Image (spheres, rainbow, N blue to C red):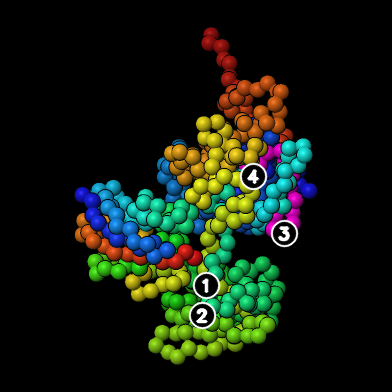
Amino acid sequence: MDINIKITDREGKLHEILAPTDMAMNLMEVIRSYEIAPEGTIGICGGMAMCASCQCYVKSNHELPEMSVDEDLMLAEAFHVEDNSRLGCQIQITPEMDGLEVELAPES
Amino acid sequence: MITTDILIIGAGPTGLFTVFEAGLLKLRCHLIDALPQAGGQCSEIYPKKPIYDIPAYPEILAGDLTDKLLEQIKQFEPSFTLGERAETIDKQEDGSFIITTNKGTKHKAPVVAIAGGLGSFEPRKPPIPNIANFEDKGVEYMIREPELYRNKNVVIAGGGDSALDWSIFLTDIAKSVTLVHRRNEFRGALDSVDKVQELKDAGKLTLITPAEIKGIKGENHVTGVVISKKDEEEFVLETDHFIPLFGLSPKLGPIANWGLEIEKNAIKVNNALDYQTNIPGIYAIGDVNTYPGKLKLILCGFHEATLMCQSAFKRIFPDKKYVMKYTTVGGVDGFDGTRKEAPKAVVKKIN
């Protein structure tokens, strides 16, 4: 099953995309698969919560998986962090996330 | 001037393995890397993380992979220019290239192999409005010369290994060391965290957490930083130096201006043949290149390096006859005079 996600890119453009829930993909990978951020500017560490290049702001009220210690401490060293900041690579796409709205944080 | 056969830009796994494949063809290599150590991302970002798709290694730590590659290429005596970024390239009349680093070191070779991964690692600069005015005037994103901080007041920001390790190191040199981090917890290695705790308890280091540096004070040089602590009013801490250590992020950098065809932050190569770029004699291998169906995997980089070396050999010795030899058959003759070979069969008569 695919779900709908709204992603605002770093230039402020809105992308309404479909993300598969059965491909073990995380949000960072979905963004890369649609090339919503240029290659080499997102998912630099590959998805290990070790670089914060996939930081995004969660705009909708979806209940997301709880933050791991790794993600929390990586965000503690990232820039432009807000209360709704998450690392895209730590958010696995599930059917419950249908309608999710996120915005990419600036590149740093 | 450093001269060699193949000048490799990037000392990550692909660059290192290139030395081996070139060595089998009796070609010598020199590697340039912006990082102070070999291994690229494997040693800089995730040395303690396991990799599961290196053929014949069900599991290997990225740091161990680097160590094993260095061991594998040892007999081919690679030389290194580390901690310098390849800045410019100039083609010579004889077809060779001269590459100059940001520190002015010059290298010459008939073949260039760009194995630059996602680019050279640059320090991540915190978004403090006036920070650029103080660069090298009290703000340093990297510690190059620890003596600079002797008897000075130093503020370090960050929560990873480099922030912890340098805080520990500088307590012996600086007049005072203050570590500022947005959390009470640190990401770095446990023994470093313990050591910082010890120094704090002994009054040798000041810890300000959870807090953030919001501004920098000074005229021509840093005189203080503005610190914001949760639920408290901002305050100024006097200091001579502010060292933000928020890790490194890769940037393609000067390579992007070398006249190479770039697509999606990567260098286009001919994958049907030899991973050569649009400039003959310059190859791009590993994560830095792109072609239809490209996968950024270490194992793909190894394959690309192997084919690229064969092409480089033909370019350097166009008239020499050569066929590929299996290492099991031909052994490995090092430039250091060592030889590895299969043990000779023991012949024993049956009576």
Amino acid type, label 3: Lys
The residue where tag 1 is placed is B126
Label 4 packing within 10 angstroms: few (<14), some (14-19), many (20+): many
Q: Residue at 63% of width from left, 77% of height from top?
A: B134
For label 4, the residue is B8
Q: How many marks do you count on the picture?
A: 4
The disc, 4 or 1, on the residue closer to the chain's N-terminal end is 4
Q: Are marks 3 and 1 in contact (CB under 8 Å)?
A: no
The secondary structure type at the circle numbered 1 is loop
Q: Are marks 1 and 2 in contact (CB under 8 Å)?
A: yes
- For label 4, the SS is strand
Task: Kindly identify the residue that appears in the image at 77 percent across and 37 percent down.
Answer: B94
Amino acid beneath label 1: Pro
Q: Nearer the viewer, mark 4 or mark 1?
A: 1
Which label is found at residue B103?
3
Q: Between disc 3 and disc 2, whose residue precedes?
A: 3
Secondary structure under the numbered disc 2 in the rendered image? strand
- Chain designation of label 3: B
What residue type is disc 4 on? Ile
- Earlier along the polypeptide chain: callout 1 or callout 2? 1
User: What's the mark number on residue B213?
Assistant: 2
Q: Residues within 10 Å of mark 2 (few under 14, many from 20)?
A: many
Viewer-closest of B269 and B341: B269
Q: Residue at x 68, y 21 (%)?
A: B321
Locate residue B318, reporting x and y percent.
70, 26
Q: Are marks 3 and 1 on the same chain?
A: yes
| Neighbour tally class for label 3: few under 14, some 14-19, many 20 plus, Cα within 10 Å | few
* Spatial CA span between label 4 and label 2: 39 Å
- Magenta residues (range): B101-113
